[in-house]
Image (tube, rainbow, N blue to C red):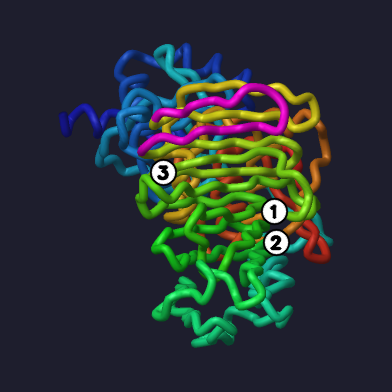
Amino acid sequence: MEQEQFNIDWDKLEMILEKPEQERISLVEQLSPEEKKALDQVLQLRTDELLTGALQINTGEAWKKTLLTIGETPVRPVRGIQRPWNRWAAAACFIILGGAAWLVLRPKPDKDAQELSIQQGLAAHMPSSKVQLITAAGQTIEVDSLKQFSEKDGTTIQQQEGTMTYQADKPASVNGSNNKGNALMNTLIVPRGHLQSLVLSDGTKVWLNADSKISFPVRFNKQERRVFVQGEVYLEVNSSAQWPFIVSVHQPGHDFQNTPDAEVQVLGTSFNVKAYNNTIYTTLATGMVLFRPSAGKPMKLSPDQQAIYETGSGTSALRNVSSEDLTSWRNDELVMNKMSLEELAAILERRYDVQLSFSDEALKKIEYSAALHLTPQVADMLETIEQTGLVRFSVKNKKITVLPYEK
């Protein structure tokens, strides 16, 4: 085996991979079987380094056969091969070898003189707004500065390590209401660029994604537990068969006082609600929920099912999904299954409080299937996406433009 390695002309193989696509394909066809085998192993090594270093690939059952696809082009799982091949930059293109599509590393294109590198252009980028709590008295508190606060009914609110907890040590005066019979309501606003978790007075746990809002009673009454949400939230509801939990779902910009676009009723379960851009997604992880759209028939969901409701047309559908993948955002993970770049851009805009525009509408249709770790800084995420070799990002005056990858 060592003699075989010695006879391989590694410079020749590197030269082939630096050629334009059509010439590269022709040259690969002229390689000897031994050279093709060597190139095959090289590509395994470089793909392995790219995926393990930049894309944190999920090893669950759904990803065992295909680790990464761009559109409809599969990339084979890889094995660690020790080879003397380390002179390429960390950007990717595709080459067909032995009927398989492989990621190949190639140098990044030169930046325009007026463009900054992603890291330079987005250095120390900070969201423009902060998480806010609006109390029953109408007081607005920045959650970052909140350590402990008491509502008018004596409920204690504590903020620690990104989680706000409501503790009602004393019984409510009128079934969870103040002495006027009106529930004390709080509203938590999570703007773009932030995440926040919350423990309600009944023990229910709530995670709010970026650009989301929840309004809820400081203490629930004895008849029902009802909260009002916009954006995306994941809930683990404290079980109580005689105490139904209802989520009123509203599209962004709709007043919580108006009729909700949909409702989700649960007894004890964990589920995700996502309401952006006139579409409501309800995904069940455990237990059972009843999804009631404002128009159309109610749908009963079982675990790993998702209800989709289009608020504009009033149409709804039910499909099987992986709830673990779709709720991975709580753990700073993004699992994509043929996700369009347009949808990915919208997620990044909310998550990091940035704006992305496309230089070409066709770029929006590029599809990705992978599992990414959502890094604290958007610059790191953009550099990871650039490594697919399909798009690049221009940063000028903090504005991000998606451009075709330049060969």
* Residue 132, image quadrant: bottom right
> Is 203 above or below relative to 368?
below
Residue 267's tag is: 3
Asked if residue 297 lies in the magenta stretch, the reply is: yes
Q: Is residue 107 magenta?
A: no
Question: Is 383 placed above or below 95 here?
Answer: below
Taking the image as shown, residue 210 lies to the left or right of residue 357, namely left
Q: Are marks 2 and 1 in contact (CB under 8 Å)?
A: yes
> Which residue type does callout 1 highlight?
Glu
- The residue lying at 35 percent from left, 50 percent from top is 239
Earlier in the chain: of badge 3 and badge 2, it is 3
For the residue pair 127 and 218, the one nearer the viewer reads as: 218
Image position of 407 with respect to 296: above or below = below
Which amino acid, by three-letter code, is at mark 3? Leu
Where are the magenta residues, as a range? 287-302
Q: Position of residue 389 (x, y in %)?
A: 60, 38
Give the mark nearer the N terminus: 3 vs 1.
3
Quadrant where the N terminus lies?
A: top left
Query: Measuring 46% from the left and 47% from the top, which residue is drawn there?
Result: 244
SS for callout 3: loop
Measure the alpha-carbon separation of dots 2 and 1: 5 Å
Q: Nearer the viewer, residue 330 or 74?
A: 330
Residue that label 2 marks = 353
Q: Position of residue 51 (x, y in %)?
A: 41, 42
**Residue at image mark 1:** 349
Task: Assess disc 1: are there few (<14), some (14-19) or many (≥20) residues with their C-alpha within 10 Å of its C-alpha.
Answer: some
